[in-house]
Amino acid sequence: MPRTMKAAVFVEPGRIELAEKPIPDVGPNDALVRITTTTICGTDVHILKGEYPVAKGLTVGHEPVGVIEKLGSAVQGYAEGQRVIAGAICPNFNSYAAQDGAPSQDGSYLVASGRCGCHGYKATAGWRFGNLIDGTQAEYVLVPDAQANLAPIPDGLTDEQVLMCPDIMSTGFKGAENANIKLGDTVVVFAQGPIGLCATAGARLLGATTIIGVDSNDHRLGIARRMGADVTLNPTTCDVVDEVLKLTGGRGADAAIEALGLQATFESALRVLKPGGTLSSLGVYSQDLRIPLDAFAAGLGDHRIVTALCPGGKERMRRLMNVIASGRIDLGPMVTHRYALDDIVAAYDLFSHQRDGVLKVAIRPA
Amino acid sequence: MPRTMKAAVFVEPGRIELAEKPIPDVGPNDALVRITTTTICGTDVHILKGEYPVAKGLTVGHEPVGVIEKLGSAVQGYAEGQRVIAGAICPNFNSYAAQDGAPSQDGSYLVASGRCGCHGYKATAGWRFGNLIDGTQAEYVLVPDAQANLAPIPDGLTDEQVLMCPDIMSTGFKGAENANIKLGDTVVVFAQGPIGLCATAGARLLGATTIIGVDSNDHRLGIARRMGADVTLNPTTCDVVDEVLKLTGGRGADAAIEALGLQATFESALRVLKPGGTLSSLGVYSQDLRIPLDAFAAGLGDHRIVTALCPGGKERMRRLMNVIASGRIDLGPMVTHRYALDDIVAAYDLFSHQRDGVLKVAIRPA
Amino acid sequence: MPRTMKAAVFVEPGRIELAEKPIPDVGPNDALVRITTTTICGTDVHILKGEYPVAKGLTVGHEPVGVIEKLGSAVQGYAEGQRVIAGAICPNFNSYAAQDGAPSQDGSYLVASGRCGCHGYKATAGWRFGNLIDGTQAEYVLVPDAQANLAPIPDGLTDEQVLMCPDIMSTGFKGAENANIKLGDTVVVFAQGPIGLCATAGARLLGATTIIGVDSNDHRLGIARRMGADVTLNPTTCDVVDEVLKLTGGRGADAAIEALGLQATFESALRVLKPGGTLSSLGVYSQDLRIPLDAFAAGLGDHRIVTALCPGGKERMRRLMNVIASGRIDLGPMVTHRYALDDIVAAYDLFSHQRDGVLKVAIRPA
Amino acid sequence: MPRTMKAAVFVEPGRIELAEKPIPDVGPNDALVRITTTTICGTDVHILKGEYPVAKGLTVGHEPVGVIEKLGSAVQGYAEGQRVIAGAICPNFNSYAAQDGAPSQDGSYLVASGRCGCHGYKATAGWRFGNLIDGTQAEYVLVPDAQANLAPIPDGLTDEQVLMCPDIMSTGFKGAENANIKLGDTVVVFAQGPIGLCATAGARLLGATTIIGVDSNDHRLGIARRMGADVTLNPTTCDVVDEVLKLTGGRGADAAIEALGLQATFESALRVLKPGGTLSSLGVYSQDLRIPLDAFAAGLGDHRIVTALCPGGKERMRRLMNVIASGRIDLGPMVTHRYALDDIVAAYDLFSHQRDGVLKVAIRPA
């Protein structure tokens, strides 16, 4: 095995570049995974632009598909050479937060908080790859808490078939799970990018029978229909709130899923809801949100607003790969472009500018 | 029986006055209840000030304790002369909304909504007394859907012991129920007015073991400790967010209950939460709310924000009266003043100006 | 309108016959519905055989599809001539039980219970048609609590498309709902009669990705695959418990649904479960059940056993008809035979002997 | 540090004796804890009698209170010398079962199952101390997965105050949690031994307002009243089912908790339930259970039967110790006798024969 590897690292705002880095040592609870396929996420673009800060020199990327190269001494039940994925969020399931029902929030990191300098736990601390530790856009990645996070790929599934599991599918499906869907529900999904498309597919899998996909891009609305939307609405050509009221005979939607991260979509998601409805929010917002008084029934509407960070862990990955293996859903069409790791700068350029109808890009080290 | 009765009616902003009105006829599903005790709610003060619009001439008030005077022909299992209460919210349990899990939202009323004039269901439509129909600050009140809403008072309980059940206790306890409390939780209750005090008591009944009561009025904090708060904090003399972090060793609160309806308390309620925590909102807000980006972990904190309208119905009332009868909680101290119905204008004056340490005022027609 | 109607009545064990009965009067909360299509249920066969006792002269049947003939004076929002269904279970939603979360159990009927002759509430009291009051195998049926129970049929759906909604579909889907299905679950459905087939379809709609249908009738297993089963097992040719363990790599099933009502299927349902799994029971049992100690991990397996009575009410019916209208599922193939009401004795004969591959029989008064 | 220690080991049915054993080595994820107090559980008596099989030579006991003697190299955030407890059940939180919501079931152990010799996961595999690995009735115990299982004792709490947390309190409270208690519920707890007493206390903490404790021992009923029972019933002097119906006006209990493990109590627990009620089972049964058809409403009563294995993990222990620290409950009176480890054979003799009003025995190595 070589001593060094190629890795895409954050250099400074505007620059992610390939670098040569040492292949990391493997501690007792770690696993070293040789990456066979990974991808670029919208969050990586925020990192590239300097909008989300990470340490200089950090390897970016958080969606690993690969082969176990080396197992830590305390990791049991796996074999070197085995094909695996791990979640974008790699929780420490031994943490208080995980045992308390929020593994993605981990709870291992105290940060200064409050005016007096006292300390609180950092939200999102379960997200480690390409955030707190070196990530997956590299030839190798070190998976922490490997016993909890390595998920074997079922025979017969290709890298690209499972490439959405670590992040996009887990997040989008969580949006549908948080929407508290009951048989016969009407669910509106705002934005049909990769996560919104998975939320659409997830809402269908969970029993919603009127799924309304919303996006200003008609091409994406077409994909939304293939992923399970019964109706699609383009807000540039209709009033979405009005249309939802018409489609539901005035009842309003049982749930709305926000998958973009903007005030406008958050607000519309609230406005389409029935009294008693649920807003499941997936977006990563970049500014304060406003809740309009009328859309909120002044606080008396029995509304629920629920946010989520992508769930991880080997059981979550096992279930998502089962969904793929069952043939219930085909996320293959979401991989629209393919690049070698050597060409990742070009891949970032295409993806960050959303050129050429790109949805997701597969990156292959070799 | 007389043909007319005295009733406190909304005349115009700033004026609620006694008037003589006909005693209403009793339809097949109604019950006429002779009021023996009722009270004034903060919402009534909003009506008095013209901040919440109701029809001129409407009898106000929504907290009935009384005696069945006459039963509709289709109402079974009750007896005239029986002592009863009914919830402030008197849902139509035959409605779609009730069968769908949101009886307080009723769903019987379509209102213009959206820009195109299409119609949506009105939130809060289950609140009828003193809002959509004549209320309880009168000698008699007509209870709609009586089969669903009349709750017999257990022997041995006085009017004042059950006077909080129809609204304050039902609302405050719902705030605790929505907070998803687990054994050993830390819960922060913002504002210790009558509803906040009931939320404090409810959080204790449901198993929270560190209950932190917050109010800027030290007298109310003293009552909060009697109602179940383990710790009290006055935001005029400390930084509440910092203190909660200290008290929880940096974990943050498992849940926060907002019982005031202001941006400041809503925002603090969000800031004291652990990642993965729940904000249970009870306040009636009077302006748009802002969710600060950092307090919300940019949408990635696995947070839940839940709002509530007071639950009603005879089963809810039965349970709340059971709580009182069990001796688990004594809400008697919350009735600080007593007035005859004839003096209700003076009662409004005292209550709306929060004079003389008033918490709740008992109003007696005779 | 005529004064009398034809109705199938229970005469004595072994005899259900057509009789001429008065068309009932319509009280303020009732609706008289002219039946256009109804069907025979397995429960009706138990009544026919005298295994389930009902009053002599009672009109049997509990699955109404029809047209509103006359509305009670207090029933609002419907029109005479409107096409409607009502649930097999017609709850009084004003009851304590309904407000307490169990509308099908109603709670209006006290029956002698216990050794001392004290009284308890009768389970299943929400089931009224053909049990406590005259049923639907007649030209007309009186629907009690019509405001809560009449559900308009969406335009474009035929009688036969919605004929399963009142009972079979509502029951089967409830079995899936009670199974607590999560995305990626393995669910085993024991027995693929009409209710089991609907449970299979429901499990698929709710996100199970490995659905294993079990029946000793290969023809029904074929239908099970069309309704959503991924795998089918015939217990006469394999060991179902062994096969489920193999199919799940030793994990066991996440949930099992019992849809027959026998000790053997109940016990197998328990044995296929993973530790922590759920047994959702739909069967109507006719003798005491035995829980084998080993299958139950001596009470330490974190198992759940959940039973259900068919849910009713207009909101439930609305949702089920939405599922049909969405095209997610087609229950049409379950109607295998059609009879005029005049020939209902022959229909019972066919159905009770399960001849000619019968699944469900449509009965038409005219 | 010495090389060997004293430990109570299972020799053969009828014999548990003190032996000298090596102090175990500490792997990277382990912690060695010096026991300061432990206790004897009813399960240990089953082991003593040979009714529950364990390996000969195994150290018994599963309730550790002690001091960290040595930490594994990968265990972080603890200090040697720190006072800690660990749950009786020490789950591997990295397991599929734990990530799937059933940590006590672990899922790490495959056992032969089914007739064909195929393999299924062993229930209860999270219970390791004194079952699968050496237990706590010794001078030292090795805690596996220490990062997940070591829970620091809050300052100010004595060993005896937290001695019930690892098993009795965690189990009893789980029984109350599984009973799905809502404010105002009536809950009947069958058997008032240590676990039943904790279930009684837990039901009170969670908001039940009519708690009915049942036991045939009047002394224990007296303790039950101190732990929170509102009413106590002795089945040797009254018909419990009749009494519960009378106390609830015929409604039946909302939930019943079985804490003994016998057919008679299981069956009575079912019979006191309202339609729609929950039976939360804690007992360890020693023979097949029978569900009487009538008590089960033939499967149509919307009943739930839920079983539980004691929850473990550091977060669970943290919460239980918070309950103790809050002063909400005092389990001190449950420790009725104290023995040195050297005298453990005498302690078993007293405890297994339930002499001298014994509830729990504290065992101290030094």
Image (cartoon, coloured by chain):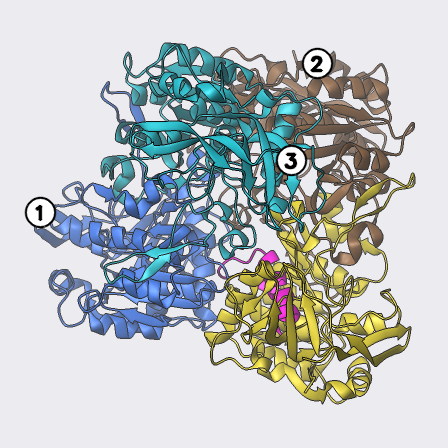
Chain colours: A cyan, B blue, C brown, D yellow
Asked if residue C250 can be seen in this view, the reply is yes
Name the chain letter of the residue that bears numbered label 2: C
Looking at the image, residue A281 sits to the left or right of residue D250; the answer is left
Mark 3 residue type = Ile
Foreground label between 1 and 2: 2
**Quadrant of the image containing the C terminus of chain C:** top right
Mark 1 residue type = Pro
Which residue is at 79% across, 65% downward? Answer: D264
Name the chain letter of the residue that bears numbered label 1: B
Residue D187, percent from left and from top: 60, 64
Vertical comparison of A73 with C144: above or below? below
Vertical comparison of B111 with D221: above or below? above
Residue A60, percent from left and from top: 43, 33
Vertical comparison of B241 with B106: above or below? below
* Residue designated by label 3: A68
Q: CA distance from mark 3 to mark 2?
A: 49 Å
Mark 2 residue type = Pro
* Residue designated by label 1: B13
Which residue is at 68% across, 45% downward? Answer: C306
Looking at the image, residue A250 sits to the left or right of residue C223; the answer is left
* Residue designated by label 2: C333
Asked whether disc 1 touches disc 2, contact meaning CB atoms under 8 Å apart, the reply is: no
Mark 3 secondary-structure assignment: strand
Residue A31, percent from left and from top: 61, 42
Residue A61, percent from left and from top: 45, 32
Name the chain letter of the residue that bears numbered label 3: A
Q: Nearer the viewer, residue C296 or C244?
A: C244
Mark 1 secondary-structure assignment: loop
Looking at the rendering, the stretch of residues picked out in magenta corresponds to D164-188
Circle 1 crowding by C-alpha within 10 Å: few under 14, some 14–19, many from 20: some
Q: Nearer the viewer, residue A325 or C2?
A: A325
